[in-house]
Amino acid sequence: MIDGAVLDIDGTVARGRKALPGALEALAELRARGVRYAFFTNDNQSPVARWVDKLAAMGIDAAPGEVVTSALVAAEAVAELHPGRPVLAVGNVGLTEALQAKGIDLVGWEEADRAEVVVMGKDPAFDQGRLEIVCRAIWGGAEFVATNADPKVPVAEGFAPGTGPMIEAVAYATGVAPLVTGKPSPWAGRMAARILGATPRRTVVVGDQLATDIAMGKAAGMRTVLVLTGSSTQADAEAADDTHRPDVVAASIAELPAVIDSWSR
C-alpha cells in the first residue's frame, strides 16, 4: 500500500552528525521492499551536495535527486510566480545556489533597492544593518518570500534557533506576512510528490514536527507518522487538531517497516 516515503532528516533519521538508532536498518528495509524515498529538510543553508555528503558520513546512501531542501522549494516557487524579476537573497550558500540554478537574477546588498522580490532563509550574517535593508526593500514594494518558518531545529546538544525568528523580525517590522514555501506549504508537498512519482494515498510522510512534517502530509493527502525522537511529543499529537494529528505515533523511524506492514494488513 506504500510506494513512497517523504523522510525528514533532523530529529527523524539523524541528530547532529549521527544517524538515530534503527534508522539505517529501516532505510535498508525500505530499499529492499522497493519503497522509493526522499529526504526532505526545511534547512535552507546547505546545498544538496553537502546534504548528500552529510548523509553519506552517517552511513546513509542518498542520491542528489533524493534530497529536497526548503531552498529548492523556494527557488521553484519564485521562478514560477515571479519570472524575470530581480531577487534579493537573504541566506547562505544553499539558498543562493538554489536560486542561481533556476536562472534567477540575484541582486547584491549594495543594490537591494533594485529588488522586486526578497527571498529569505537563515542568514548567519543577519544583523541590524541587513534587517534595515530587507525592510526597506519590502517597504518599497518587493514581494516577501520565506523558505520556512521553523522556530527551532534539533541539534546534537538539544535545539538551536531556526529560520523563523529572523522571518518574524522582518514581518513584524514591515507588517507584511511572507509567502512561506517550505514545509508545510502546498509547494513543499507538490515537490515531494513529483520527486517520488507516487500518489498521495500511497505515500507516507515521516517526521518529528507536527507543524511542518505532519501538517504537510495531511494537507497533501498522504499518510503521516510522527516519530518521538525530535520536537513534538505524544501529548502534542493527542492535543493536535485534524490538520496536525498524525495517523500513527512511533517511538522512532525504526518502527516504520512495522507501521507499513500494519497498513498492508
Image (spheres, rainbow, N blue to C red):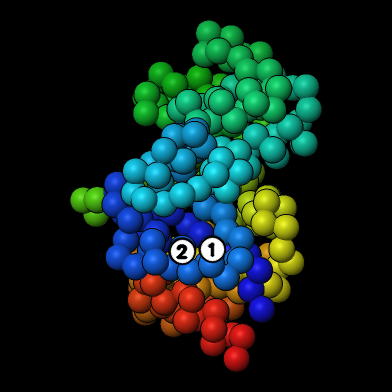
The residues tagged by marks 2 and 1 sit, at their Cα atoms, a distance apart of: 5 Å
> For mark 2, what is the residue?
28
Q: Quadrant of residue 65?
A: top right
Q: Position of residue 180 (x, y in %)?
A: 60, 46
**Residue corresponding to mark 1:** 31
Residue 90 lies, in percent from the top left, at 51, 27
Query: Camera-side residue: 239 or 257?
Result: 257
Q: Identify which amino acid the numbered label 1 is placed on.
A: Arg
From what the image shows, is residue 243 above or below residue 169? below
Residue 162 locus on image (x, y percent): 39, 45
Please indicate, yes or no, whether residue 62 appears anywhere in the rendered image.
yes
Q: Left or right? Give the position of 230 relative to 106.
A: left
Q: Which residue lies furthest to the top in this view?
A: 110
Q: In which quarter of the image is residue 103?
A: top right
Left or right of residue 115, residue 29 in this image: left
Residue pictured at 42% horizontal, 30% vertical: 123
Q: Residue furthest left?
A: 157
Does 94 sit left or right of 20 as displayed? Answer: right
